[in-house]
Amino acid sequence: LQLAPVAAFSDLPTLLPPGTTIVVTDTKGRHVKGKLSGLSGESLSLAMDGRIQKFTRPEVWEVRKVIPDTIVNGGLIGLVAGFVLPAVICTSRSDASETYFCVAGAFALGGLPGLGIGLGIDAMRSRKVMLFRSSSGTPHAFTVTPVVTPGRIELRASVRLGKTGGRESRRRR
């Protein structure tokens, strides 16, 4: 699935139906992931953890769609990897009367767990496809945001590395 980025923010509704998981990078360099709950030519809203966060068009620097990996290929790779080597080893060391049980054992003890591991790994993987990037500059390279809660004061610093990457660190006082 190839998605071409759009040139204008107002073109995003053609690519993003409600409920699509996206990552928005704002002009301060923060990355916010959520499900699209609203989108117009002037703003978008993300649902995340039971709350809605709204971004206006000037606040959005980049929008990426999260596309989950298909789990079929990982499952098949795991099945083959877990089954083939044990089956080859045990059939080469057993006589003809043991071959069926050897292959069945390799499948049950190697192939099925490999299938499960492959499915699990692929279920956790996803890729992000860029759909929109603002033509007006880049996000700030470094931002510091104070967070005040009862009994604690934090400073959250965000450092943008490269064109779109970022790291966030916390310091407590």
Image (cartoon, rainbow, N blue to C red):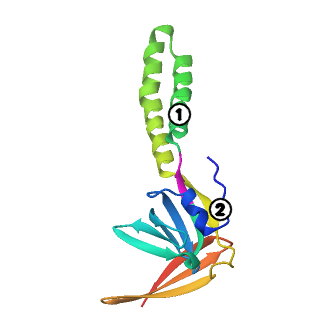
Quarter the C terminus occupies: bottom left
Whether the magenta-drawn stretch holds residue 67 is answered as yes
Q: Residue at x 43, y 57 (%)?
A: 19
Q: Which residues are magenta?
A: 65-69
Q: Which mark is residue 34?
A: none
Element under disc 2 = loop
Whether the magenta-drawn stretch holds residue 74 is answered as no
Where does label 2 land, which residue? 6
- Residue in the foreground of this view, choosing between 54 and 26: 54
* Amino acid carrying mark 1 in the image: Leu
Above or below, 154 relative to 96: below
Q: Judge from the rendering whether residue 53 lies leftward or rightward of residue 139; answer left or right.
A: left
Above or below, 20 relative to 110: below
Q: Which mark is residue 76?
A: 1
Percent coordinates x, y for residue 70 in the rendering? 52, 43
* Amino acid carrying mark 2 in the image: Val
Percent coordinates x, y for residue 36 in the rendering? 46, 62
